[in-house]
Structures are given as structure tokens and as C-alpha cells.
Image (cartoon, helix red, strand yellow):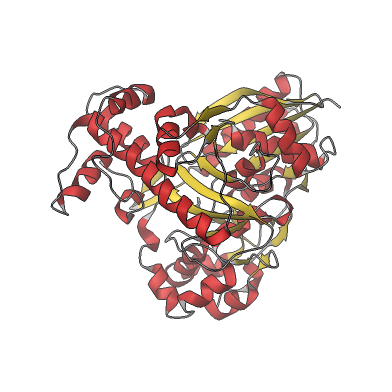
Amino acid sequence: MNKRVLALDFGATSGRAMLCSFDGNKIDIEELHRFDNSPVQINGVLYWDILRLYHELKTGIVKAKLKGGFDSIGIDTWGVDFALIDENGKMLSNPVHYRDRRTERMQEEVFKIVPKDEIYATTGIQFLDFNTIYQLMYVKKYCPQDYERADKFIMVPDLFAYFLTGAKVCERTIASTGQLVDPRTGDWAWGLIDKLGLKRSLFPEIVDSGSTYGMLSREVCEELQVEPVPVIAVCCHDTASAVVSVPSTENNFEYISCGTWSLLGTELNKPLFSCPDYTNEIGHDRTIRYLQNIMGLWIINESKRTWDKQGHSLGYGEIAALAEKEEGGKFIFDVNDDEFMYPGDMPEKVRKWFISRNLPAPEGIGQIARSIYDSIAECYRVATDGLVKLTGKKSAIHMIGGGINATLLCRLTASATKLPVYAGPSEATVIGNAAVQLIALKAIKDLSAARKIVKNSVELKEYLPE
């Protein structure tokens, strides 16, 4: 059964449109359109440039049409962020970026209303300043005019689907990222929502991954000169899509979805509430992605941006080569320190972390980069040890996503965790997005069959502990 599906993948720093072809045995992907995703700072607020991103999405659709067309569309993005829609269906403003500082103190304000332990016992979600719960509470308290005008809040991937189809719903995996869903039921945590005083009418219906938002609207089809096809609610959280593509035929696996963020976890049949450092996000077929959010290659990305401004035009491969020349394990820092969350001069932030603790600090590009890679791998080790203690699962690690192109990090991960690492696919999110579309189109039977097909479709690279 030959099918062609269009996967639209929006990462935190870039996006792409990928045409994915399935011949019954493997999935082949072709990049049609790649674009930058840079936030916009206006009057002290960091926004997503959502209308430009929608323009890029439409450009991807047109390019896919010119390549011979497609049977469906699926969209995935980062988690937690949303837009407010008024009763006339108009977007009130661009979505605010999760790295904006507006929610820095909102957790404490929320805990005065509902205790921290109760929130975790209800949602099972790791506490992060930018979670949807704190963003909505910020809007309610500090932007009451927007809150009162809002008819619905719609998560970012669902927002793009709304633009394309008119459907105002929320896909389950993306809803689960915001600390407002009960993972036992998969529905909104209505008791928590009521205690916080959030209006119930704001929350759209939640739909399963693999369901259909609707067909491309007549207006969109006329504008882009395309035929109406279904827009499928894939696993709309990019990590959930990536986890679909883990090429394991075993239920007992650990994964690291490695990109701007690192998401380290395993797949469970039901949520586990024993440690608030781990999160229970929902996956395809209502599985549980039991994982920890780790500050990943964002630190390298931001460091490169600073070095570029300083006149050092180095590619990521060149940065890694400089890091490999340096002594390993010499400068280890906590990559999850809050200071590394926000944009800025990241190399100086790394140095200040050591200096403020009266420790020797790394000097120069090579040492700082090695320090970052070593520290990410050490964080993987700690998180893996915790995962084994909490779940009893110990297995090889599947590293997936664009971060596996940093082969130094893959090697360091194997050595730090003392576990074999299988790297691939690098295009995990796109392949997972496509796989869920193909399941919805009945070209692939189920999640288990999809993972076998992914294994047929990609070449894995093995890294053994040294």
C-alpha cells in the first residue's frame, strides 16, 4: 500500500516540511522546506512569530503539492505554549515563548492556592516554570483583559490545525505537557482547574492521537490550489512523535530524545507518581512517557550563537572537534540550573557557574564545549540511575533525534551510563509523525508494527561503554 504523507515538524529553533513515502515495508523521507524559528522580543515580551510560521507551513504544503501531492497532513511542535482565541475565532495575540521570564515566580503563587504535592499527585508532571498551568495563571492574574475576552486556549500544534481546518480541539499528547491533565483518565484535571479558579469553558475537547481534525478548509484549498485532504492529529508534542519512532521491538527500553531539549525516559502502561523529578506525559495509544526534562543541546546552540557574534564562525562539527581535544571529566556543572534556561551569553554563564562556587572554570571554546558535553552526559547518567530505581527497567539506550549527530555526546553517554547506546533515527520526530498518520490511514496496523517498520527504515549506530 503506497502512501505519501506530509509531516510538518516545528522545533524550538527551526522547522521543516518533510514528504514521507511508505511502500508497505519502510518509510522514506524527503525534506522539502526548512526554515528558521526565531522568537521576537517586543516591549520586554518574547513571542513566537506564529503568523510567519504559518506562512512557512503553507509554503511546505505548496512544495509538497508540486512534488506530486500527499494523502494527509500531520503537525507536531514543542510543548506547553498556546494562543488565546476569542468568541469570534480570532487570535488575541501571538503565543508567548516558554523562555519568556513572565512565569519565573508563578509556581509559588499557584502553590498558595493548591499545594505542590497535590498538583503532582493529580497530574504527575515535573515542575517547570513554563508549564501551561503557570502561563494560564499568569494571564488570569496579570492580563485580565485577555483572560476575560478568551473563549478558548489552543496549544500551538492545534492552533496550526485550527488555521487549516477550523477545528478547536486539543490533541492528548500535547495537552499532557502542561500540568493540567490527569494521566490516569487522559482528560483535563477538572478538580485542579476548579480550585485554581480557571474557567472551564476555556478548555477545548481533548482528542486522541490518530484522530482527524477535519479536512483542509475550502479557503485554504483555494489559496494554495490543493485538494482537500485530512489533517490528522498525530502525536502533536514533538517528543511524543519521536518516541513513536523508537526502533525497539521490546517493551523494556530507555530512550533519550536528543535535541534542543533532552528527554530521557521509558514507556509505561500507567503513570508512576513516586518522584516529582520525573514526568508522566501521554503517548500514542495513551501509553505513558515517563521521563525527565534535561537541558540539552540548547546550551551548545546558544554558545555557538555567542561565538558567532564574536567572529568565530564554527560549525557544530568543528566545535565538537575542539571539545574532543580537551581532557574529559574536568569541568562538570549542573545543566539543569535555572540560569541556563534563558537566552544570553551561554559560555560566560557556564564560566560563572564555576566561578561563583570558587571552582576552576573552563577557558576557551574547546574547554567550554567539552564541559557542556561532559555535563549533559553526566546528567544522563544520574537520570538513568534514577529511572532504573523507580521503574526496575534497565536496558540499552535508544538515542533519537538530531542530537545524535553529535557523536561525541553519544560516546560520552555510553561511557557515563555504562550501557550500550543505539543511535537512530536522527529524524525521529518526522518519522513518528508520519507513522501515526499512516496508522490513521490504516496503512500501518498499530504502534508495534510502526516500530518494526522504523527499524527497517533506518540504520542504527552502536556505541559501547569504554
Residue 326 visible at all:
yes
Q: Residue at x 42, y 61 (%)?
A: 129
Residue closer to the observer: 439 or 155: 439
Please provide percent x and percent y for residue 226: 76, 29
Please provide percent x and percent y for residue 133: 51, 66
Looking at this rendering, what residue extends furthest in the top direction? 67
Whether 388 is drawn above or below 368: the answer is below
Whether 341 is drawn above or below 363: the answer is below
The answer to whether 257 appears left or right of 308 in the picture is right
Q: Quadrant of residue 109?
A: bottom left
Quadrant where the N terminus lies? top right
Q: Quadrant of residue 141?
A: bottom left
Q: How many numbered discs sit on the rendered protein?
A: 0
The answer to whether 454 appears left or right of 154 in the picture is right
Residue closer to the observer: 322 or 304: 322
Whether 442 is drawn above or below 383: the answer is above
Residue 218 visible at all:
no
Residue closer to the observer: 175 or 360: 360
Please provide percent x and percent y for residue 178: 55, 60
Residue closer to the observer: 245 or 435: 245
